Amino acid sequence: MEITKISENSIKIRGKKTSLIVDPAPIGAKNSADAVIYLENGMQGASPKVENYRIIIESAGEYEVGGVKINGIPSSEGCLFTIIIDGLRVLLSTTKVLEKLQEKLEQHDVSILRVNSDFNPAHITSLESAAVLFFGAKAQEGAKTLGEEKVTKVEKYAVTADKLPVEMQIIVFK
């Protein structure tokens, strides 16, 4: 699985067969994806900058796109998604939604969070993820909240189920 920053608040998750665009920006280069996922309420709608998508996921439910399973859990602020892609269990959410749904969380291999609010660092460490990726306007602040000295800044991050980091790795998209 590969995660690439598209814009400050948008990323692309690409598996072996399927790609997903999260919160596509209304400006910038066009991207192609199998599905578009919106994390927050009020952001929904087709993006003119995403081509060839088969589905827009903007609410809770169970979905399958090209062999990728996506399960959305609702909150008043948006949805938290669990994505099963390339043998990895991935959490995808905003920090605001994560805080609201803390009681419903379970372990994930990788956590991808758009930092849009303050959060309790214990909520993230309780996920026991091998990698925690932050993106969004407050991504750097989010990484500092965890108190980690070793923060890796990248534009692209790739990981496979058999090569997960042993210790929790903190990644910030630059």
Image (cartoon, rainbow, N blue to C red):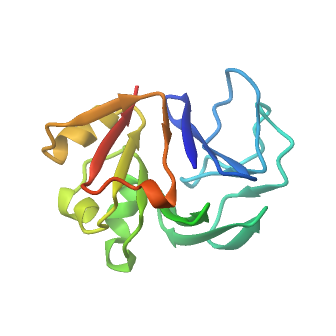
Quarter of the image for residue 107 reads bottom left
Left or right of 125 in this view: 158: right
Tell me residue 20's x, y (percent).
Answer: 68, 49
Tell me residue 89's x, y (percent).
Answer: 50, 66
Q: Which residue is drawn at the image coordinates 26% and 54% (left, top)? A: 168
Residue projecting furthest to the front: 162
Q: In this view, does 172 lie above or below 61?
A: above
Q: Which residue is drawn at the image coordinates 71% and 21% (left, top)? A: 29
Residue projecting furthest to the top: 28
Q: Which residue is drawn at the image coordinates 34% and 61% (left, top)? A: 129
Quadrant of the drawing holding the C terminus:
top left
Left or right of 132 in this view: 84: right
Q: Is residue 83 above or below residue 45?
A: below
Front in this rendered view, residue 52 or 131: 131
Left or right of 95 in this view: 28: right
Front in this rendered view, residue 137 or 92: 92
Tell me residue 13's x, y (percent).
Answer: 61, 46
Q: In this view, does 51 lie above or below 83?
A: above
Q: Which residue is drawn at the image coordinates 29% and 66% (left, top)? A: 128
